[in-house]
Image: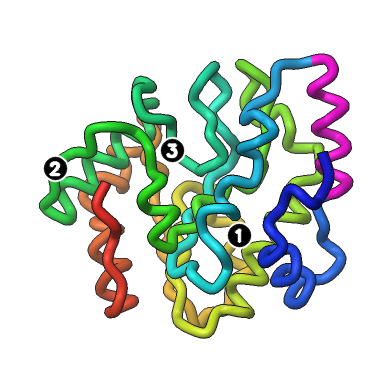
Amino acid sequence: MSMDALPVKWREFIARYAPGAAPDAALAQVEKRRAEHEVYPPRGKLFRAFELAPPEAVRVVIVGQDPYHNPGEAEGLAFSVPAGVTLPPSLRNLFKEYAEDLHRPVPATGSLEAWARGGVLLLNAILSVDAHAPASHRDCGWGKFTDAAIRAVSQGAEKRIAFILWGNFARGKKKLIDPRHFILEGAHPSPLSAYRGFFGSRPFSQVEAALGDWRWPEL
């Protein structure tokens, strides 16, 4: 697998605003791991967040840590799982807050594809993982590339962007973001922290209020 798998618009965009951060080295490391481990997501979905949300369309960036590590869950979009897959606890909590905050029904499936197509870059900072081994690809080199993507969106966006940083890991990316954008920091929706500040934080309506001309797509 080569960098050609990354959509050309994103390759050019990142090269313009954050040169020298191509994902080739990380891809090579991941291919080596695939020879010995079951790796998620599958090759065809590794850059799906970029495929569904071209750089000129991005209005919101949600930063996740790494993909789900159970079979059938990871699909290349942070927090999202394919339709028909049981909701992981973090996504279940996210949906509870989404429904209460925006006065909408709880989504019927775990797919966040509608968000991605509507301008939400669902970006895991680490784009791959070994089966049943969270954070197992943290040393594969993804950080340099995804940091560059965050920096490029921050610098290259013509409109104000909202960056959602849930949990300490994501909050560590704040230094990459121009303060002209709306930066929402808060507790992670995981069961360990959802009751320590995530529930009741109203992140979705906060984003809509900050951007003014953008609304969360219906799920």
Left or right: where does residue 59 sit relative to residue 148? left
Q: In which quarter of the image is residue 124?
A: top right
Q: Position of residue 187 (x, y in %)?
A: 39, 48
The residue closer to the viewer here, 199 or 14, is 14
Cβ atoms under marks 2 and 1 closer than 8 Å: no
Q: Quadrant of residue 82?
A: top left
Q: How far apart are marks 3 and 2 (CA)?
A: 17 Å
Left or right: where does residue 44 sit relative to residue 193? right
Q: Earlier in the sequence, mark 3 or mark 1?
A: 3
* Amino acid identity at mark 2: Pro
Q: Where is residue 87 in the image (x, y as percent from the top left)?
A: 35, 26
Q: Give the range drawn in magenta.
A: 24-36
* Amino acid identity at mark 3: Ser
Q: Mark 3 points at which residue?
A: 80
* Amino acid identity at mark 1: Lys
Residue appearing at x 34%, y 33% in the figure? 110
Q: How far apart are marks 2 and 1 (CA)?
A: 31 Å
Residue appearing at x 21%, y 50% in the figure? 200
Q: Is residue 33 on the magenta stretch? A: yes
